[in-house]
Amino acid sequence: MTPPSLPHQDLNASITSVRSVGARSAARLARLGIQTVRQLLWHLPSRYEDYSQSVPIADVVVGEKQSIQGEVISIATRNIWPKRMTITTATIRDESGAIRAVWFNQPYLEETLASGTMVSLAGKIVLDKRGLYISGPIYEKVGSTRSDAGTLVHTGRLIPIYPETEGVTSKFLRFLIQPILEHLNIVDPLPDAIRRAYDLAPLSDALRVLHYPESEEDVPAARERLAFDDLLLLQLKALRERRFIHQLKSTSIVMNAVYMRELIAHLPFTLTKDQRVATLEILKDMERPYPMNRLLEGDVGSGKTVIAFLVALHAAREGHQTVLLAPTEVLAHQHYKTLQTLIQNIPDITTAYITGSSAYLSDKEASKPAVKKAIRAGTAHIVIGTHALIQQDVLFHSLALVVIDEQHRFGVHQRAALMKADRGSTARIPHLLSMTATPIPRTLAMTIFGDLDISILREKPKGRLLIHTKVVGAEERQAVYDFIRSEVKSGRQVFVICPAIELPTAVAPVSTGKTLKQTKLSALWAQVKAVEDEFKKLSKDMFPDLKIAMLHGRMKPAQKKTVMHEFKEGWHDILVATSVIEVGVDVPNASIMVIEGADRFGLAQLHQFRGRVGRAEHQSYCFLFPTDDVTANRRLKAMTMTDDGFALAEQDMRIRGPGEFFGIKQSGIPDLTMTALANVELIKKAREAAVTLMKTDPDLKRNPLLAQQVDRVQMFSHFE
Ligand code: ADP
Ligand code: MG
């Protein structure tokens, strides 16, 4: 075979610069995300097939995938009607014997592998009534002697199998990649000193091993080398981000310890130790003349909000404003009410509230212009709202602190817009406090969110009852219903959550040309049906004497509101609902959460559902009913082991992988790095290397290739 391309050193060159790649192939390759030579070389095999041992034809074994070598003795193609297919059959012979090779729809092989050709074939050995044959083997021509086998690309060794797409087979990819590897001579962006310090292979070697390993044992180290590069770039970017942030100007607010002590003494409860530490960490950050970039992590109910309010009050006392952004109006409103209660006995604090639908100043509804005016003048100290606040062009007098609740629900751009919200007189960058119930490990946070600081609330406020959680098999269902009846008799209420029933239409294959909208619609219908069926079952058969209501996505907003209100007021004993119940529902009298088809939900969702009960003094219960055929499920088991959302989330991340878990699959971080994000040791090494590099060469002047690549790294940043 003639080499399809010249040796290529410029990794950023377009894929079309590779010989044999024309416009059509380029378009197909693009579907695999391959547009440059680099992307081609970084398109790594998903696995390897072992054809390293070619066997004498006499020794082939039925059912095995094997590699043979020999001479084509005869080859012929015939048509099979009426199927419009062709079969090409060849006979291959070596010293030990002969065997047939059979291909469908490749009539050109008659020419390519004309009789007399020496070939290497690899494929599955099959037995039919005429004897053994090798089925649809991958093939390549070899020299006339066996010793030429060293240059085999497709057979006679470990063969890379790549992620493929229509029109781009592994065979085609091998045909493109192998010749490039053969003459690979690229500049290694990693400084030698670092490479040696961490015992990493040169880049060219690692690439060669990854595509054509001598043995699969060599693969992990080579993968690690490539992952290290990506992690190093992320770390360098994070350190640069930190340096950049340190150059920005913020309002420095010196801590007023006396006032803080007063505020804390004022609270209706005692802060947990974690809460006190976090508060102090935030106040210390805000003393600095550059912006805080801190993440406050804590499970639902761990008491994050009160910390935000304490530091906001502290800022207000020093004459500065705070804005708190919530992801939904319901949550914004809840925060506002909490804040009102908190400041009852604190003099001289004015609060403001702005969402898409309403506006308040202190406890009175006000017109939006009036509220905006107060914010502009600085007479409103603490402002609460939703993202509508950003769109409404609110200007501040002296915005010192931005608090974002459930930060993952805000887009990167929304956050960035907010950081520029202080277009008032100070022209300083506000301090940023993000709050989240998702536990992001420190290493991971540094890697994907830039170099932010983290405070963690692990300890729950005192007096929280543990919710009893149980996975219930079919044989115990009746016992649970009896228990439900007795709880209802003593005045409690019950949630029943249903997953979507799988309707036949909802699982139609992608290729039917269904639009996304149709698929979503049928998914919605599946949920409605599930709720209606369950409602019927419970109200007719199980509990004809109890009051039961239902809630699902096909109901009008007003209807939903009414049902929720009635349930909260105790009009219904049982509420059958879809996952709409997940956020913002507060019914303290409810003590039982039943989840049907529990194995269909993710851990985070299950934990959220469970959080709907146990919100008052009543001992509460969560019953998980799995689908019939699921007995042991790791997620359900995890639910019964702990009600610590952090522990669960860590488990979830282990089960699903960091990419899925954080919803960062589409972030542009390569798969390889994504996997490496679970490799804490490697992250630490990359971190260390980045710190060393930045010390000796802060602007990467001596490592221009690295500098170039760092510039291309995308990272979530609040401050850019
Ligand atoms: P998060 O936002 O972390 O989910 P919240 O800040 O909404 O949690 O707090 C949940 C509830 O716990 C609130 O009613 C709050 O007043 C209360 N709370 C917060 N800290 C404490 C504490 N240290 N002791 C008792 N109750 C607390
Ligand atoms: Mg909260």
Image (cartoon, rainbow, N blue to C red):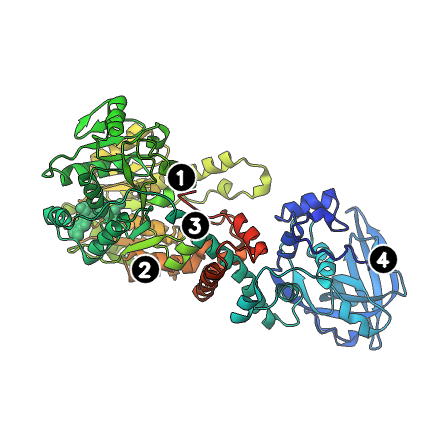
Amino acid bearing label 4: Thr
Mark nearer the N terminus (3 vs 1): 3
Residue named by callout 4: 112
Mark nearer the N terminus (4 vs 2): 4
Q: In this view, does 356 lie to the left or right of 157?
A: left
Mark nearer the N terminus (3 vs 4): 4
Residue named by callout 2: 647
Mark identifier at residue 241 = 3
In which image quadrant can residue 177 be found?
Answer: bottom right
Q: Where is residue 705 in the image (x, y as percent from the top left)?
A: 59, 55
Q: Which corner quadrant holds the N terminus?
A: bottom right
Mark nearer the N terminus (1 vs 2): 1
Instruction: From the viewer's side, name the closer residue of 253 and 642.
Output: 253
**What is the distance, in whole Å, between disc 3 and disc 4 at their CAs?**
57 Å
Which of label 2 and label 3 is nearer to you? Answer: 3
Which of label 3 and label 1 is nearer to you? Answer: 3
Mark nearer the N terminus (4 vs 1): 4
**What residue appears at the point 77 percent right and 51 percent down from the top-left corner?**
19
In which image quadrant can residue 338 be found?
Answer: top left
- In the rendered image, is residue 329 in sight? yes
**What is the distance, in whole Å, between disc 3 and disc 1 at their CAs?**
14 Å
Q: Where is residue 104 in the image (x, y as percent from the top left)?
A: 77, 54
Q: Position of residue 173 (x, y in %)?
A: 70, 55
- In the rendered image, is residue 482 in sight? no
Rendered position, 281 above or below 22:
below
Residue named by callout 1: 416
